Amino acid sequence: MHTLPKLPYAYDALEPHIDAKTMEIHHTKHHQAYIDKLNGAIKGTDFEGMELNHLIRNVDTLPQDIRATVRNNGGGHSNHSFFWEIMGPDCGGEPSGEVGDAINEAFGSFDKFKEIFANAAVSRFGSGWAWLMVEDGRLGITSTPNQDTPIMEGKKVILGLDVWEHAYYLKYQNRRADYIAQWWDVVNWEKVNELFEKAR
Ligand code: MN3
């Protein structure tokens, strides 16, 4: 049975960029709901004990009657568990380490990378995510609808941004671009670098 991971910091730790109320509802209500629906779908099946990302990498091979539920809610569980980890207090700034070099190499500069990533996030119609991913050892930016993730296509994610309205509406209302601009100040680049080194 899948369970809600503990948030690695307090609900108010990402203030003022992401407010405590949003973090609490996002974690205890939205993330929990994905987990409950995922558990409900796989209970008593062969997939009950399967590791989460293994399950969603193989989502297209699941029985038809649970496929969509696992895609949406297993994806939701994976995406949110990941999202909490790549943010933190006293973070932001410029990426250092190998991922910093790789970003400069792939996109020209950190500013250019931020511009392309933010554009992917702001232009995702409706609900979804923007991603920095590693494919065949190379960095790429993409966005996905709903709770889909590049993991479902066999890629590895090292940074992700939730652009569902529930992630920002209390503080930013319709201003998704403002939320994205503020979010850079909570990105945990040390964690992203660690993920990059593993993913390459
Ligand atoms: Mn969310």
Image (cartoon, rainbow, N blue to C red):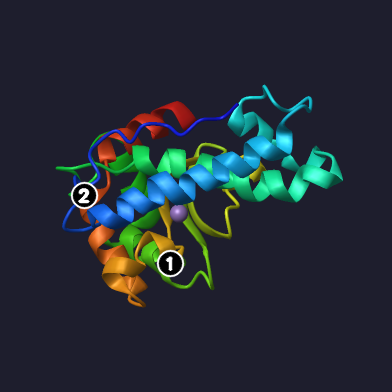
Percent x, y for residue 113?
A: 34, 58
Q: Which residue is mark 1?
A: 165
- Which label's residue is closer to the chain start, 2 or 1? 2
Q: Which residue is mark 2?
A: 14
Crowding at mark 1 (Cα within 10 Å: few <14, some 14-19, many 20+): some
Label 1 sits on what residue type? Answer: Glu
Q: Is residue 56 visible?
A: no
Percent x, y for residue 173? 33, 75
Q: What's the mark number on residue 129?
A: none
Q: Is residue 91 shown left or right of residue 170?
A: left
Residue 175 visible at all: yes
Would you call the spot at circle 2 few (<14 residues within 10 Å), some (14-19), or many (20 or more)? many
Q: What residue do we see at 53% from left, 47% from top?
A: 33
Q: Secondary structure at mark 2?
A: loop
Q: Residue furthest right?
A: 64
Q: Residue at 72% x, 39% y: name it.
A: 41
Q: Is residue 176 left or right of residue 81?
A: left
Q: Residue furthest bottom?
A: 174
Q: Are marks 2 and 1 in contact (CB under 8 Å)?
A: no
In the rendered image, the quadrant that contains the N terminus is: top right
User: Residue 167 lies in what quarter of the image?
Assistant: bottom left
24 sits left or right of 68 in the view: left
Image: 84 above or below 142? above
Q: Judge whether 131 appears above or below 58 on screen.
A: below
Amino acid type, residue under disc 2 in the picture = Leu
Kind of element beneath mark 1: helix
